[in-house]
Amino acid sequence: MTVIDISPSVMQFLLAFIVVAPLLGALAALLPAPPGLKGKNPDQAVLRHGVTVTGAVLVAAIVLAAGFDHDHPATMQATTDISWIPALDVRIHLSIDGISLPLLVLTALLTFLCALYSYFKLPAGPSPKAFVALVLVLESGTLATFAVLDLLLFFLAFEMVLIPMYFLIARWGGDQRQAAAWKFILYTLLGSVVMLLGLLLIGLKSGTFDMVALATDNGRGLTTSVQVIAVLAIGLGLAVKTPMWPLHSWLPDAHTAAPTVGSVLLAGVLLKMGTYGFVRILLPVAPDGMRTFAPYLAAFAVVGIVYGSLACLALARTGAKGDLKRLIAYSSVGHMGFVLLGIATMTPTGVNGALFANIAHGLITGLLFFLVGAVKDRYGTADLDTLAGARGAALYGRAPRLGALLAFAAVASLGLPGLAGFWGEMLTLFGAYSPAEGLSRPAFRTFMAIGAFGTLLTAAYMLIVVRRVCMGEHAPHSRLSPDEQTPQAADGPQQSGAAGSPSSGGAGPRTATTPQLADIHPYEAAAWTPLAALTVVAGLWPAVLLGLTDPAVQQLLAGGKS
């Protein structure tokens, strides 16, 4: 069944367009604009170019999804297969199935929303031309990662995103951006070198780099020792990008320093590349090697769940001077732990849960980083103690819509039933209860119990954040300084317009009892509403996503045999 009937040749074109268009758009962004397109403001013109290109890619992705045969999601569709390097049998092989299609659409959506948000609120930094070009290169590399089916091409796409993200952090980031950018690039590059060795080992030993052929063979052409070495090498590279504890330490620094859109793309898209590699490459290509390392992967995953939650609790406590962006970054370590736990079960239930949790995390954490960036713009800080300080009513009273949306994203992140975050965590825990044959049930049930405890910790820190940021803290003996009583301090150094206007109570000095902030702007509503709506849709109607992934996962784990 397809929503609209599209010929195979058009489907091929759409997928190729989705991968290549952002790269061509990045090149066009760096060229001088034609005189008729410069407009009165060349900077706004190039930002408008970014919105146009990402919008076109999103439309193409939606049409591709509509033309996708939902009755056969395990079948590779929109396939392009062209010989590229005959001597190594490396091919330009593009195709999608029920596993890659949701990630492709998620990437196109988040990148478009980031481009739209940046059009109205560009982060401080160098030329907008470079900013738009970097975002488009980042999008092209990510989309290619989810669309290619050749191991070497996968590696090239996997690496393509590193340089643009490095510059987005280093040039448009906040405090400590240079150190955070270097830490990001060093960790990921070192992991990638090891991963390349593992990919070459598989390709040379099996005689092909084609991921479909390798998945169909299901490891029968590779000895157990080769599979173990390959899983160790490739898994390390993927684990750094995921990130898995204890290879996660680059993530909090990168998120804290990155601009808002950089954090959204890093959490919503880039982290998914690592977990996708586990599912697409290691599970079907080296099942014996994965079975060897699955208990260790699950153990690291549950440690990451608990560690991330405890780190968030430490940052959320009063007096810790915790940064809200850093807290959300540590929460990602815990959420991606659930994804890795689901993959480690090597069962259809667990892997489907992992893929669902991937999409849910992209929607919810992308929304959270948008909201935290908006709060930081208004207050001029993301310090939790400052946000929760004696400023009268907090977000619920000062910017009620913003406060309500932040509370919504927080309860979605903690896995409230009826929202997207619930299904992924539940399915991964079910998968751990009954892991694949050959894996220790007592060990995995222990991991399940630890993971379930992690959900309680997640609820604890998220509710503390909502209470402190949205409700504020009563401090009767503290007083606002004269600077904090001005409209500028109340609204944040970069905020202007409605919050300081007479109609919003902004005329004259603020008092501790009647502070106001600018609530959600129209451009913010446009960027955030799709994420909130999809969080609800995925929570209430999980079959939309599971109907795509389950047949593909079943076939992948069966070695290409449905």
Image (cartoon, rainbow, N blue to C red):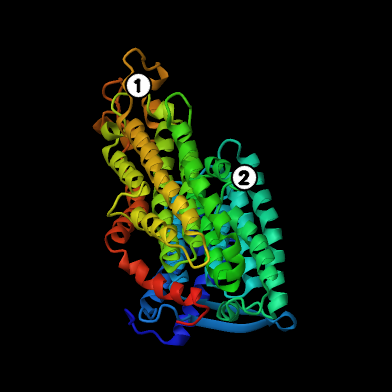
Q: Nearer the viewer, residue 495 or 450?
A: 450
Q: Nearer the viewer, residue 130 or 409?
A: 409
Whether residue 168 is visible = yes
300 sits to left or right of 59: right
Q: How many marks?
A: 2
- Residue 48, position in %: x, y? 46, 58
Mark with earlier residue (1, 2): 2
Q: Nearer the viewer, residue 55 or 218?
A: 218
Task: Name the outermost residue toward the left.
Answer: 503
| Circle 1 or circle 2, nearest the eye | 1
C-alpha distance separating marks 1 and 2: 34 Å
> Which element is circle 2 on?
helix
> What residue lies at 27% left-to-right and 38% top-to-bottom?
400
- Residue 266, position in %: x, y? 52, 52
Q: Amino acid at mark 2?
A: Ala
> What residue lies at 30% left-to-right and 31% top-to-bottom?
471
The quarter holding residue 89 reads: bottom right
Q: Is residue 548 above or below residue 121?
A: below
> Which element is circle 1 on?
loop
Q: Is residue 246 above or below residue 37?
A: above
Which numbered marker is on residue 390? 1
The residue indicated by pointer 2 is 170
Whether residue 34 is visible = no
The quarter holding residue 425 reads: bottom left
Q: Amino acid at mark 1?
A: Ala
302 sits to left or right of 484: right
- Residue 263, position in %: x, y? 50, 48
Q: Is residue 95 above or below residue 486?
A: below
